C-alpha cells in the first residue's frame, strides 16, 4: 500500500507541473505585428532582416533580446530597445532605434607616411551616409593593413574621435628612439651601427630593417643577431631597438683542390681574416698551384657610404703555362705567361639614396711572355712582343637600381669604366680604354600566373628569373697590348668557345639566361651568348652559342655547371657563382 500511494503522489505532482507550464506558455500572447520606429535613413526591411521574432508566433522574450543585439550589431545605431503594445488579438512588437549621425567629414591626424587623400582610398564609409561602426572598423583594418603591407608594422590606430558627424582618426606612427648594441667584444660598435641605416627619429619600417639585419648577418662576423623592442615609458610613439650579437671566429685557413676544364688540376691554401682588428677590414693571403699558379695578398676595407671611403691594396703574382694563343679563331701556339701586379684603389657612394658609386684604382703590372711552343705552320705571333710594364688609372661609375629588399636580384645595374694607361712610373704604353655594361633582372612569376600553377613551383622569394647582360667597349688605340685587349671566349663570356678565342680593341657581348628554380637550392638555367671582339670590328659578324646549366647552392657557395654548344665543339664548364 505504501509503495502504491507514493507512486500516485508522483503522478499527481507531474500532472500539476505540466498544467502550470502549459498555463505559463498560454499566458504569452500571440504577436500580431512587428515594426520599427526611429529610423530615418536605414530602411525598415533592412533592420527586420536580422530579427527572429515573426508575426503570428507566440511572444518569446529570449528571441526579443537576441533581436536587440542583432539590430545593434548592424552598426548603424547608438541605441536599440523594444516596446510591446497590447492588442485585442495579442501584442504588437516595435523595435525602437536611434541612428548614428550622418557622416560630415573624416580626417586623420598623426599620419606622415601617407597623405590623408591616400588613406581615404582605403575607407568605404562615405560622407552623407549614416555612420556604421562595423563598416568603419573594417575601414580602419584596411588602413592598418596598408601600413603593415608596406613594412610599417608598428603603426596603429590609437583613437577615433566622433563629434556628431565629424570623425577624426588618430594614427600613431612609431619612430626610432635609442639603438642599443650589445654582446660585441671584438667588433667595434661603429662597425655594427653603420650597417643599421635607421637613425633616431626615423619611422620604423620592418622591411628596410630586416634588409639591414640581413646585411649585418651577411658580414660573417656574427653567429647570431637578435633584436628586441622597447617602448619608453610615456612615449607610445617611440620604439627603442636592442641588438644583441653573438660573435664568431672571422679568421680561417682554407685548402682547395679543383679541376677546371681549361686549367686542369689545381690546389692551394688561403688565409682570410674578414674582421681584422674588429674594424671590418679584410686580409687575404694565399696561393694556387697548377697550370695557372697564382700568389696574392690583398688588404681592404670594403664598406662604403656617403661619408665613408672604401679602399683596397694588393699584390698578385701569376705564372701560367701552356696557354693557348688564338688568331682568326685558330690556335697559333702555346706559351707561358708571368706577371707581377700591384694595385691601390678607393671610392665611395653618392647620390640621394646612395645608388651611385665611384671607385678609382691605380694599377701597375709587369708582364713577360716566353716559351713559345707547339706552333702551327706559318703561325701568327701578335703576343710575345707585348712584354713590358703597364701603369694605368681606372675610374668606374656604378648605378645600382636593383631592389635592395629582396633575396634575389630584381631591377638593373649599370657600370661604366675608363682606363687610362700612361708612360709614367716605368710604364711602356699609353692608351685609353672605355667600356660600359648593363645587367638586368626580371622575375617572370606574374607573367606566368594563370598559365601554369606558379604558386606550387616558384615562390615570391625564389622566382623564375630572366637575366641579361650587355657589354660594349672600345679604345682610342688602333691596337692594345695583349694583356689589355678585350677578350671573349671561355666560361665567363662566350661559353661555346675556348678562352680568349676573340681579342681586339673593340668588344660587344650579350649574355641571356633563364633561371628556373627546381627547388630551394637547385635551379636549371638555359642560356644564349652572342658577341665578338676584334681590332676592326665588323658589327654584322657575331659568334654565338647556347646551352643548359645547373646551379646548386652549397655551404661552400653556389656551384655552376654549364654545357655550351657553339664553335667547333661543345664545351663543359665547372665553376662557382652565377655568370653575372
Image: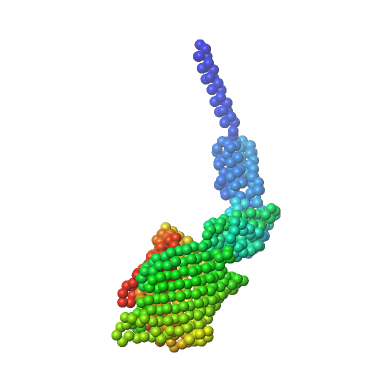
Dividing the picture into quadrants, the one containing residue 141 is: bottom right
Residue at figure coordinates x 42%, y 81% from the top left: 368
Residue positioned most to the left: 377
Question: Where residue 398 sits: x, y (%)?
Answer: 53, 75
Asked if residue 286 can be seen in this view, the reply is yes
Dividing the picture into quadrants, the one containing residue 13 is: top right
576 or 259, which is in the foreground? 259
Does 195 appear above or below 359? Answer: above
Does 580 appear above or below 135? Answer: below
430 or 242, which is in the foreground? 430
Residue at figure coordinates x 61%, y 55% from the top left: 229
In the picture provided, is 132 more to the left or to the right than 437? right
Residue at figure coordinates x 63%, y 59% from the top left: 179
123 or 58, which is in the foreground? 123
Question: Where residue 80 sits: x, y (%)?
Answer: 64, 45
Question: Where residue 33 sits: x, y (%)?
Answer: 59, 41
Residue at figure coordinates x 50%, y 75% from the top left: 315
Asked if residue 122 can be seen in this view, the reply is no
Amino acid at each position: 500500500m505504501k509503495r502504491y500511494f507514493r507512486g500516485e503522489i508522483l503522478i499527481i505532482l507531474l500532472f500539476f507541473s505540466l498544467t502550470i507550464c502549459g498555463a505559463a506558455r498560454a499566458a504569452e500572447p500571440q504577436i500580431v505585428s512587428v515594426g520599427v520606429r526611429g529610423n530615418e535613413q536605414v530602411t525598415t526591411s533592412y533592420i527586420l532582416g536580422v530579427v527572429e521574432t515573426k508575426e503570428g508566433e507566440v511572444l518569446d522574450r529570449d528571441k526579443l533580446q537576441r533581436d536587440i543585439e542583432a539590430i545593434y550589431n548592424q552598426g548603424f545605431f547608438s541605441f536599440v530597445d523594444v516596446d510591446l503594445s497590447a492588442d485585442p488579438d495579442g501584442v504588437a512588437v516595435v523595435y525602437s532605434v536611434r541612428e548614428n549621425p550622418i557622416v560630415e567629414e573624416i580626417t586623420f591626424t598623426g599620419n606622415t607616411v601617407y597623405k590623408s587623400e591616400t588613406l581615404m582610398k582605403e575607407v568605404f564609409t562615405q560622407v552623407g551616409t549614416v555612420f556604421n561602426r562595423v563598416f568603419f572598423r573594417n575601414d580602419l583594418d584596411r588602413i592598418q593593413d596598408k601600413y603593415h603591407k608596406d613594412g610599417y608594422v608598428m603603426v596603429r590606430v590609437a583613437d577615433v574621435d566622433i563629434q556628431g558627424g565629424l570623425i577624426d582618426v588618430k594614427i600613431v606612427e612609431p619612430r626610432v628612439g635609442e639603438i642599443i648594441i650589445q654582446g660585441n667584444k671584438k667588433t667595434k660598435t661603429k662597425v655594427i651601427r653603420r650597417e643599421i641605416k635607421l637613425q633616431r627619429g626615423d619611422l620604423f619600417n620592418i622591411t628596410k630593417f630586416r634588409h639591414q639585419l640581413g646585411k649585418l648577418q651577411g658580414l660573417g662576423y656574427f653567429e647570431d643577431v637578435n633584436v628586441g623592442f622597447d617602448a619608453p615609458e610615456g612615449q607610445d610613439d617611440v620604439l627603442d631597438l636592442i641588438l644583441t650579437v653573438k660573435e664568431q671566429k672571422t679568421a680561417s685557413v682554407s685548402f682547395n683542390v679543383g679541376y677546371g676544364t681549361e686549367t686542369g688540376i689545381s690546389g692551394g691554401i688561403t688565409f682570410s681574416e674578414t674582421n681584422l682588428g674588429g674594424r671590418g677590414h679584410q686580409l687575404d693571403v694565399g696561393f694556387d698551384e697548377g697550370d695557372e699558379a697564382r700568389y696574392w695578398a690583398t688588404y681592404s676595407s670594403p664598406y662604403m657610404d656617403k661619408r665613408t671611403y672604401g679602399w683596397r691594396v694588393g699584390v698578385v703574382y701569376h705564372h701560367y703555362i701552356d696557354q693557348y694563343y688564338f688568331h682568326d679563331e685558330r690556335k697559333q701556339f702555346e706559351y707561358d705567361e708571368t706577371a707581377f701586379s700591384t694595385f691601390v684603389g678607393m671610392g665611395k657612394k653618392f647620390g640621394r639614396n646612395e645608388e651611385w658609386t665611384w671607385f678609382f684604382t691605380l694599377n701597375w703590372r709587369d708582364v713577360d711572355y716566353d716559351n713559345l711552343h707547339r706552333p702551327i705552320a706559318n703561325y701568327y705571333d701578335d703576343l710575345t712582343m707585348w712584354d713590358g710594364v703597364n701603369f694605368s688609372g681606372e675610374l668606374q661609375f656604378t648605378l645600382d637600381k636593383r631592389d635592395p629588399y629582396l633575396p634575389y636580384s630584381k631591377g638593373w645595374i649599370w657600370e661604366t669604366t675608363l682606363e687610362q694607361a700612361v708612360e709614367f712610373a716605368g710604364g711602356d704604353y699609353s692608351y685609353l680604354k672605355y667600356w660600359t655594361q648593363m645587367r638586368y633582372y626580371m622575375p617572370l612569376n606574374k607573367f606566368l600566373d594563370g598559365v601554369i600553377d606558379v604558386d606550387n613551383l616558384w615562390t615570391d622569394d625564389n622566382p623564375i628569373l630572366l637575366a641579361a647582360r650587355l657589354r660594349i667597349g672600345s679604345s682610342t688605340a688602333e691596337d692594345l697590348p695583349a694583356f689589355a685587349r678585350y677578350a671573349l671566349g671561355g666560361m665567363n663570356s662566350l661559353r661555346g668557345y675556348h678562352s680568349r678565342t676573340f681579342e681586339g680593341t673593340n668588344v660587344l657581348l650579350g649574355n641571356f639566361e633563364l633561371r628556373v628554380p627546381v627547388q630551394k637550392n637547385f635551379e636549371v638555367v638555359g642560356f644564349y651568348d652572342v658577341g665578338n671582339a676584334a681590332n676592326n670590328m665588323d658589327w654584322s659578324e657575331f659568334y654565338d652559342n647556347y646551352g643548359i646549366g645547373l646551379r646548386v647552392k652549397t655551404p661552400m657557395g653556389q656551384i655552376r655547371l654549364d654545357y655550351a654548344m657553339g664553335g667547333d665543339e661543345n664545351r663543359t664548364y665547372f665553376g662557382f657563382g652565377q655568370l653575372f
